[in-house]
């Protein structure tokens, strides 16, 4: 993969300012269980926010709620103090734990995302080429996206999301099935996007990755926020018993 510095800064989204993102009294229940119960969470501008916690803690569901894909049973999500209005969704992007790719070529997947985000046709070929280069996916450009390997699919999903230059990018374990070299390359893409001002909210199980990329950590346990702290403080001395056990490699239920 090429250096992420190759992304040309462009003004797809000239207007900024949908942060902070805040959740108030957020509750989600399914099948008689409370899956999310968060009194308050505020995610502001700044370095990447890493969402950590054991399997089933509610990390993926929280991202979907914040992204506006699921309606909570109670509570609300505010962007810069306002309920999500039309257009907010276009200023955020999400890469799912299992990439969702369209039944078309790799290049067409990127082109379609740009089109939906209002990038004019004349500017799309160059933006597609840039994204393919960033993901190291030039040889696969014409291949049906769904025939890519798992790691290639994750790379495509990430560069497609970055191509639209979102103001906030939700990433759900974006390197879970990548080899070490591809993981390092993806981390570089994420760090570069963050350095250019994209707010990253990312789920990871990898403490090393969270240390490398994170400015702060949201630690979830059983649908609640057990801890929301500065990354340095979190790794030096986690405040919650659950996080201490998690970092010590113990099974946290
Ligand atoms: N539609 C549903 N109905 C009932 N329970 C659900 C539903 N969707 C998710 N859950 C449950 O909600 C809990 C949280 O799920 P979620 O996918 O957010 O976990 P996670 O923290 O992302 O875990 P992982 O680290 O394994 O990805 C899990 O126990 C899951 O089984
Ligand atoms: Mg998950």
Image (spheres, rainbow, N blue to C red):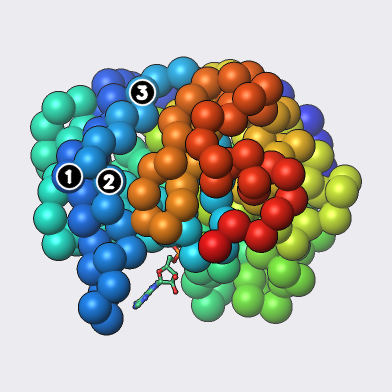
Q: Which residue is mark 3?
A: 44
In this rendering, the answer to whether 27 lies above or below 5 is below
The reply to whether residue 161 is visible in this rendering is: no
Q: Secondary structure at mark 3?
A: loop
Q: Which residue is mark 2?
A: 38
Relative horizontal placement of residue 65, taking residue 50 as reference (left or right) = left
Foreground disc of the pair 3, 1: 1
**What is the crowding at mark 1: few (fewer than 14 residues within 10 Å), some, or many (at least 20)?**
some
**What is the crowding at mark 3: few (fewer than 14 residues within 10 Å), some, or many (at least 20)?**
some
Q: Which residue is mark 1?
A: 25
Residue 6, percent across and down?
70, 28
Occupied quadrant, residue 233: top right
Point 31% across, 29% down: residue: 42
The first of marks 2 and 3 along the sequence is: 2
The first of marks 3 and 1 along the sequence is: 1
Residue 91, percent across and down?
33, 38
In this view of the protein, which residue sits in the foreground, 221 or 8? 221
Q: What separation in Å lies between label 2 and label 1 (alpha carbons)?
A: 6 Å
Mark 2 CB within 8 Å of ligand 1: no
In this view of the protein, which residue sits in the foreground, 165 or 36? 36
Quadrant where the image shows the C terminus = bottom right
In contact (CB < 8 Å): disc 2 and disc 1: yes
Relative horizontal placement of residue 56, taking residue 189 as reference (left or right) = left
């Amino acid at each position: 993969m090429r250096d992420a510095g190759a992304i040309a800064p462009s003004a797809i989204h000239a207007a900024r300012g949908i942060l902070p993102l805040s959740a108030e009294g957020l509750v989600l229940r399914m099948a008689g269980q409370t899956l999310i119960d968060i009194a308050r969470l505020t995610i502001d501008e700044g370095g990447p926010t890493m969402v950590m916690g054991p399997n089933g803690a509610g990390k993926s569901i929280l991202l979907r709620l914040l992204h506006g894909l699921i309606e909570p049973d109670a509570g609300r999500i505010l962007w810069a103090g306002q309920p999500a209005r039309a257009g907010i969704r276009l200023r955020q992007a999400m890469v799912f734990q299992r990439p969702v790719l369209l039944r078309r070529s790799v290049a067409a997947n990127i082109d379609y995302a740009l089109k939906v985000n209002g990038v004019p046709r004349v500017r799309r070929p160059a933006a597609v080429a840039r994204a393919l280069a960033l993901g190291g996916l030039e040889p696969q450009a014409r291949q049906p996206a769904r025939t890519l390997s798992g790691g290639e699919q994750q790379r495509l999903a990430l560069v497609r999301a970055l191509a639209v230059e979102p103001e906030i990018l939700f990433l759900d374990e974006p390197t879970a099935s990548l080899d070490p070299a591809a993981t390092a390359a993806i981390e570089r893409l994420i760090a570069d996007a963050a350095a250019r001002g994209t707010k990253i909210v990312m789920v990871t199980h990898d403490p090393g990755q969270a240390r490398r990329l994170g400015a702060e950590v949201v630690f979830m346990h059983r649908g609640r926020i057990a801890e929301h702290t500065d990354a340095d403080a979190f790794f030096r001395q986690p405040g919650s018993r659950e996080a201490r056990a998690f970092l010590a490699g113990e099974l946290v239920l």
